[in-house]
Amino acid sequence: MTARIERHRADRPISWRTIEEPLALAGAVERAANDADAILVDCLTVWLSNLFWQHREGAPGQVEDAAHADFKGLAP
């Protein structure tokens, strides 16, 4: 996995700014939007996996609630 991550980093253009945010994705997107014309989120499945892991012992629906709470104020 480490080699795969390094390959992804090396494949990105130098002009791209990389932000690695494991959980607070909406906040990272909001901050990045202040300085960027476009934002690429790579990869939503890793973010969801992180949420599932963080809430692995929680009640059913807790991951969905956490995702909604994170993005609540982001979309118009």
Image (cartoon, rainbow, N blue to C red):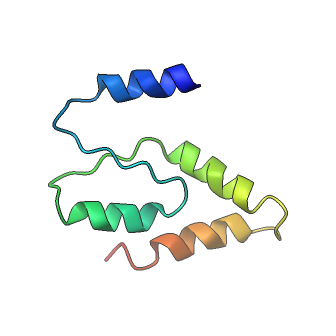
Q: Nearer the viewer, residue 44 or 25?
A: 25
Relative height, residue 50 to residue 71 (above, below): above
Residue 44: x percent and y percent? 50, 47
Say whether residue 21 is left or right of residue 37.
right
Q: Quadrant of residue 29?
A: bottom left
Q: Is residue 40 above or below residue 3?
A: below
- Give the camera-side residue of 74 and 12: 12
Residue 43 on image: x %, y % = 47, 42
> Which quarter of the rendered picture does the C terminus lie within?
bottom left
Whether residue 17 sits left or right of residue 27 in the image: it is: left
Residue visible at 32% across and 67% down? Answer: 30
Residue 13 is situated, as x and y percent measured from the top left of the image, at 21, 29
**4 versus 61 height, above or below:** above
Percent x, y for residue 69? Answer: 55, 76
> In the rendered picture of this protein, how many numbered marks are placed on residues?
0
**Relative vertical location of residue 65 with respect to residue 17 in this rendering, above or below:** below
What residue is at 73 percent from the left and 70 percent from the top?
62
Q: Residue at x 74, y 63 (%)?
A: 55
Quadrant (top left/top right/bottom left/bottom right) for the N terminus? top right
Tell me what residue is drawn at x 55 percent, y 59 percent: 23
> Image check: 6 left or right of 60?
left
Which of 47 and 18 lies nearest the eye of the viewer? 18
Task: Using the rendered view, name the quadrant where residue 35 is placed.
Answer: bottom left
